[in-house]
Structures are given as structure tokens and as C-alpha cells.
Amino acid sequence: MNKQTLSPAQLAAYIDHTLLKADATAKDIEKLCAEARENHFYSVCVNGSWVRQARHFLEGTGVKVACVVGFPLGAMSGDAKRFETEAAIDDGAQEIDVVLNIGRLKAGDDKYVLRELRDVVEAADEWPVKVILETCLLTQEEKIRACKLVVESGARFVKTSTGFSTGGATVEDVKLMRETVGPKFGVKASGGIRDAKTALAMIEAGATRLGTSASVAIVNGLAASGTSSY
């Protein structure tokens, strides 16, 4: 198989530049957006209260604003997730990253999980929804079942992790998710991606989007190393 190559600019186009810490301030969000503008990242990913500001800072740049919903546990009511999604879209969010109800999935309550995801997809009003599985908490069978429910729900992506649990993205999980959802569905790797080598490995495994707070270091590291093949 021939090696594929990515330039730093091409790698940047995979990245959701992320800041989800509880103590993030308006100045931090402004810095996040400035970095996204400068590096042409695909999007910034923020908590709901910062969506409106992020849209303001990124107006006219082409960089999208993604918002997390039900973050980071996914265990709140489905109605709360729906309302949170509607509020984020009203504030200008262009993508939604929602956390799956992990406990309901583990209990085998697939009908609940599917209904909740469909509600979020509907509330997102045709904007893309990414569903965070929190793979570090799931068995192999649960990961596969979750992926199938996400595809059925009308969402556009499966996503590995919040980055706030016991583990992040792994190459093995990304490969499994890609195999389960097929070649055309979105797969987002997030959690613990801090260097270009890891980023490229996730793309090789089948990721079509990367979520990371180390985006600038990753792109700069690729430019410095020249190691752009995967």
C-alpha cells in the first residue's frame, strides 16, 4: 500500500481545536479562535456558554463552531440534551458533539439511547451531530452496538472520547469504529492526541476528524519534523 502524505495545512483541516475546561475565560476563547483562524483548523469546539462569542471571533473566517452537549457524563435527561442542543444552535453552533447515555447503553436500553439521539439530531436542525461513545468505559460489543445506534439515529459522526474520563482515543478503537460504521460515515478521534505522530496514526486508522487542545503543537510539530506520511 502506498504511503499517503499530509501537509501541515491538510492536517489542520482535520482538527476541531478544543477548549472545554471549566475555568476557561473569554480571553481564553478569544485566543482559541485566533489560533484557529491563523492555522485554518476545521472548527473550534467549546462549551455552550461560549458559542456566541466564538461565532463573533470567527465571523467571516470559514472556521466552524462546534458545541458539546450533555458533557462530559451524558447522564442527564434526554430533554435537557435536546434543550441544550437547541440553545447552542440558536447561539450559532454549526456542529454538536453530544455524549451518549453510557449507563443506558450498558443496561441494554437501546430504545432509550436511540430515541435520545434522534431527538438531538432533530434539535440540531440538520447541522452535523457527533456522538461521543466514551470508548474507555465500553466493552467491544458495546462499542459496536453504540456505533450502529449512532448510524441509525441520523447523526453524522461517532466520536471516541470526551477527554475527561479514564482514557482517550486509541488506534484500535478508531479501527473498530471505522469497520462498524462503514467507509463514508464520520469518525472523530479525541482524547490524548498531543503530537503529530499520534494524529497521523488516528487518520491512518480511519479518523476523518481529530479533537485536540494541542492543535497548534501538532501542526507545528509536523512542519518541523517533515514526518507527514501515514
Image: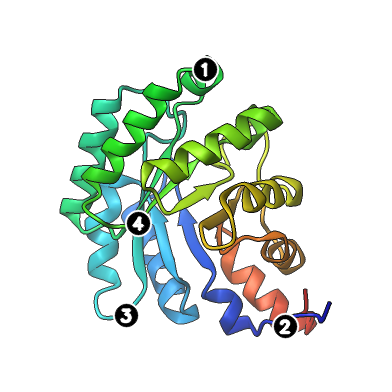
Of the residues shown, which amino acid type is indicated by label 2?
Answer: Thr
Relative depth, front residue between 82 and 196: 82
Which of the marked residues, 2 or 3, is nearer the chain's N terminus? 2
Q: Residue at x 29, y 52 (%)?
A: 50
Which of the marked residues, 2 or 1, is nearer the chain's N terminus? 2
Q: Which residue corresponds to mark 4?
A: 128
Image: 197 above or below 155: below
Task: Tell me the CA gap for discs 2 and 3.
Answer: 26 Å
| Whole-percent x, y for residue 71 in the image | 41, 36
| Whole-percent x, y for residue 88 in the image | 24, 48
Which of the marked residues, 1 or 3, is nearer the chain's N terminus? 3
Task: Tell me the CA gap for discs 1 and 3.
Answer: 43 Å
54 displayed left or right of 170: left
Which of the marked residues, 3 or 4, is nearer the chain's N terminus? 3
Tell which tag, 1 or 3, sits nearer the viewer: 1
Image: 127 above or below 163: below
Q: Residue at x 58, y 70 (%)?
A: 216
Tell which tag, 2 or 3, sits nearer the viewer: 2
Which of the marked residues, 4 or 1, is nearer the chain's N terminus? 1
Mark on residue 61?
3
Q: Which residue corresponds to mark 1?
A: 108
Label 1 close to label 3 by CB (< 8 Å): no
Crowd tier of the residue under label 2, counting other residues whose Cα lies within 10 Å: few below 14, some 14–19, many 20 or above: few
